[in-house]
Image (cartoon, rainbow, N blue to C red):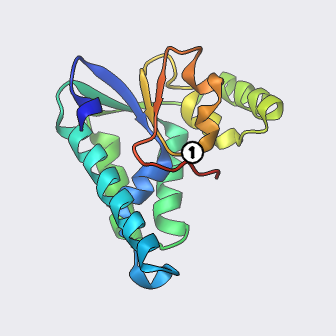
Amino acid sequence: MKTLVGREMNIMIDTEIWSYAFKKPQKEKFSTYDLFLKAMEMHKKAKELISSSLVNPQIKIYVSTHQLAEIFHVLGFRGHQLPLNFVTSLLADIIVSEKIVKVPVRIEHVVSAIDLSFKTKIHIWDFLCFLPIKDFISKIFTNDEHFKHNIFSDNGRIEVINPFKDWIKI
């Protein structure tokens, strides 16, 4: 991917993209073949983003400990549920990976997340993923419309990149 070439970069990959990467779309779940093809394209792009980030020596992926729980829940319990032994193994791999930096959620993050969620009406979960890592990252890969809010760009310091065409509101 063109956006992943260049100098050292610390990134966040939003939970939905992890979901797109690991949950292969099932044709029978879509009302039209075109929607299925669109979902397959998102699946391929998400897989490529994560794979290329993991092998690129210039990239570190940052996740908060809350996001680890989100990834587990989204893959194992929401929508098309992946086998829990696979999801548990994936999370174990993420936890031991040196390419993925895990940052704990502290009580200050929770307090700030509550305040920001109240002020912006954006889900607290987005803030619990973002606040612990915001000082370490320069890019966020997401298609969640909430991340278009300037809080997530940290006044332009962080680039919010949608690797797909459409934004969604979760």
- Judged from this view, the residue extending furthest toward the right is 118
| Between 74 and 52, the one nearer to me in the picture | 52
| Between 125 and 110, the one nearer to me in the picture | 125
Q: Which residue sits at x=17%, y=38%? A: 55
From the top left corner, tell me how far across and down residue 72 is, in percent.
Answer: 47, 56
Tell me: 70 left or right of 2: right
Three-letter amino acid code of the residue under disc 1: Asp
Quadrant position of the N terminus in the picture: top left
**Residue 152 image-quadrant placement:** top right
Q: Which residue sits at x=38%, y=57%? A: 42
Q: How many marks?
A: 1
Q: Which residue sits at x=42%, y=26%? A: 139
Indicate whether 121 appears above or below 51: above
- Judged from this view, the residue extending furthest toward the bottom is 28
From the top left corner, tell me how far across and down residue 10 is, in percent.
Answer: 35, 24
Indicate whether 3 appears above or below 126: above
**Residue 108 image-quadrant placement:** top right
| Between 142 and 37, the one nearer to me in the picture | 37
Tell me: 119 left or right of 87: right
From the top left corner, tell me how far across and down residue 11 is, in percent.
Answer: 38, 29
Judged from the image, the secondary structure of the residue bearing numbered disc 1 is: loop
Quick one: label 1, few (<14), some, or many (20+) residues within 10 Å?
A: some
From the top left corner, tell me how far across and down residue 122 is, in percent.
Answer: 72, 39
Q: Which residue sits at x=69%, y=30%? A: 110
Indicate whether 146 appears above or below 6: below
Indicate whether 125 appears above or below 42: above
Residue labelled with disc 1: 144
**Residue 25 image-quadrant placement:** bottom left
